Image (cartoon, rainbow, N blue to C red):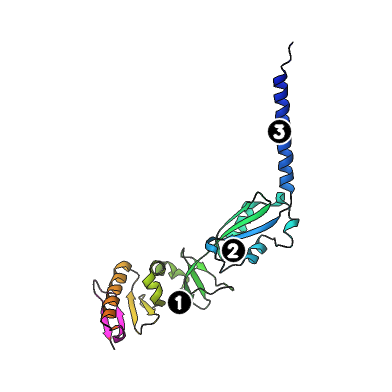
Amino acid sequence: MKINWNYIKAFALLILVVFLYSFSAKRHATRNLKSVEVAFTNGENLYITENAVNKLLIVNPDSVQNVSKEILVLNKLESVLDNHDMIEDAEVYLTVDGSLGTLITQRKPIARVANKKHFYIDTNGKKMPLSANYSARVPWVSNISEKEIAEIFPLLKKIEKDEFLTKHITAIDRLENGDYKLQLRTLDFEVLFGKISAIERKVDNFKAFYKKAYIDKKLDAYTSVNLQFENQVVCTKK
């Protein structure tokens, strides 16, 4: 019987490739980590520091070389980071040069609630604790409970997205009847917003009033501006 040496060579080559791949993969898995690289989306690490992220990973620059890559479970590390009060999303990965990479997206507060224990409301309408590292410059909200976060959230989102409102509104107060009152940064009058309804119409009416009063140089002539009524702004003069 004639031996087909081509088949034998091909089979031997396949075995060699599998062996080398397995050997390489094993060495790669057991190789110690070179370093930990922490990055933040938008380059911001206002509410949680790089050192705090390292501690969550149970890794720091002094001991990272002693951690074998085969003991790392990336999904578990991501879960640990995602459960942190200041983190909205985390990605954990291994780089080709043997580093552990993390990409952190922090939660973003859009209001601060002045309750018995202060807390933030974030961009998703969730309660967020204050940070020891940074104090956000956001409107203060008073006289609301946690169950009323959902009620005020549409107004807070509108303020966050609107440059004019962000510039002028510094505080929001919920009155006993469920109406809301807005306080402004530099103007000496209060804005009676009413219930959290018809937000777009009320904001448009307020902007139209502000523009006309600014042109007429009468912004200092009022004690209050009421936006509750349909298609009109009712002002109280000093």
Q: Residue at x 29, y 68 (%)?
A: 201
Which quadrant of the figure contains the C terminus? bottom left
Which quadrant of the figure contains the N terminus? top right
Q: Name the residue under label 2.
A: 84
Q: Which of marks 3 and 2 is in front?
A: 3
Type of amino acid under label 2: His
Instruction: Specify which label sits upstream in the sequence, 3 or 1.
Output: 3
Q: Is 229 a magenta residue?
A: yes
Which segment did they paint magenta?
A: 219-236
How many neighbours does mark 1 have within 10 angstroms: few (below 14), some (14-19), or many (20 or more)? some
Inter-mark Cα distance, 1 to 2: 24 Å
Asked where in the image residue 158 lies, by quadrant, the reply is bottom left
Type of amino acid under label 3: Val
Residue 17's disc number: 3
Secondary element at image label 1: strand
Q: In the image, residue 75 lies at what x, y percent?
A: 62, 52
Q: Nearer the viewer, mark 3 or mark 1?
A: 3
Mark 3 touches mark 2? (CB < 8 Å): no
Q: Is the residue 146 above or below the residue 56 in the image?
A: below
Inter-mark Cα distance, 3 to 2: 44 Å
Type of amino acid under label 1: Trp
Identity of the residue furthest to the bottom in this view:
238
Secondary element at image label 2: loop
Inter-mark Cα distance, 3 to 1: 65 Å
Instruction: Specify which label sits upstream in the sequence, 1 or 2.
Output: 2
